[in-house]
Amino acid sequence: MALRFERERAHPPERVWRALTERAELSAWHPTPFELDRLPGGAVKYASGAGLPAMEDGEVLDFDPPRLLAYTWFEDRLRWELRPQGDGCLLVLTHTFGERFKAARDGAGWHVCLWWLSRHLDGAPTGRGDDVDGLPRGGRELNEEYLRRFDIPPEKATPPPSG
């Protein structure tokens, strides 16, 4: 199962590329900031610390600046494509899941993270909570929407939605 997001950005691919690959920029919007070896087969070393999940290193699958970055994230694969479009670009994220039942949680998470990425690129305040004015919707509501979209019964979702 795969989930695909497309977002038009008013920023050139080179600017968005930095936000996708530089640790200081990732920390503003990505759920698991990382440093990576910039070649296929290289390591993705996820940050650890308060508020971050413990993760094993991932692997770089594709690296073609500033248009393509793909790597493993847990047992999943993330593929980020940047396509020039006028003065900006089209950002395409394809998340291929190792386990279908976590698609709702991760889909809702990427929905919010891409919103944070947009704010970061625009120079607006960022963070990881969902209590900022303008957030598209709260995490719980988004998770419920993705459960419906993927026809995942809440009792089978991983992790189960919080009450």
Image (cartoon, rainbow, N blue to C red):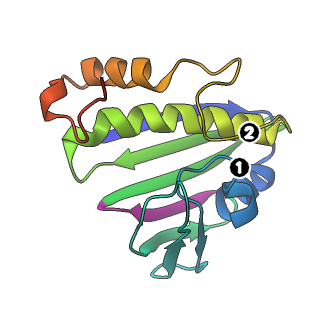
Residue 136, given in percent of the width and then of the height, sits at 59, 19
- 94 inside magenta stretch: no
- Magenta span: predominant SS is strand
Residues in magenta? 67-75
Dot 2 or dot 1, earlier in sequence? 1
Instruction: Determine which of the numbered discs, if any, sits on residue 59 in the image.
Output: none
For the residue pair 151 and 131, the one nearer the viewer reads as 131
Q: What residue is rendered at 74% in x and 39% in y? A: 126
Q: In the displayed structure, would residue 66 be above or below residue 108?
A: below
Instruction: Determine which of the numbered discs, if any, sits on residue 126 in the image.
Output: 2
Amino acid on which the number 1 mark rests in the picture: Ala
Q: What residue is rendered at 71% in x and 35% in y? A: 118
Q: What residue is rendered at 65% in x and 56% in y? A: 20
Residue 147, given in percent of the width and then of the height, sits at 27, 24
CB-based contact (under 8 Å), mark 2 and mark 1 = yes
Q: CA distance from mark 2 to mark 1?
A: 6 Å
Give the secondary structure at mark 2. Answer: loop
Q: Classify residue 161 by image quadrant.
A: top left
Q: In the displayed structure, would residue 145 be above or below residue 26?
A: above
Residue 21, given in percent of the width and then of the height, sits at 66, 63
Relative horizontal placement of residue 12, taking residue 31 as reference (left or right): right
- Residue under numbered circle 1: 28
Residue 92, given in percent of the width and then of the height, sits at 55, 41
Give the secondary structure at mark 1. Answer: loop
Can residue 61 be seen here? The reply is yes
Image quadrant where one finds the C terminus: top left
- 72 inside magenta stretch: yes
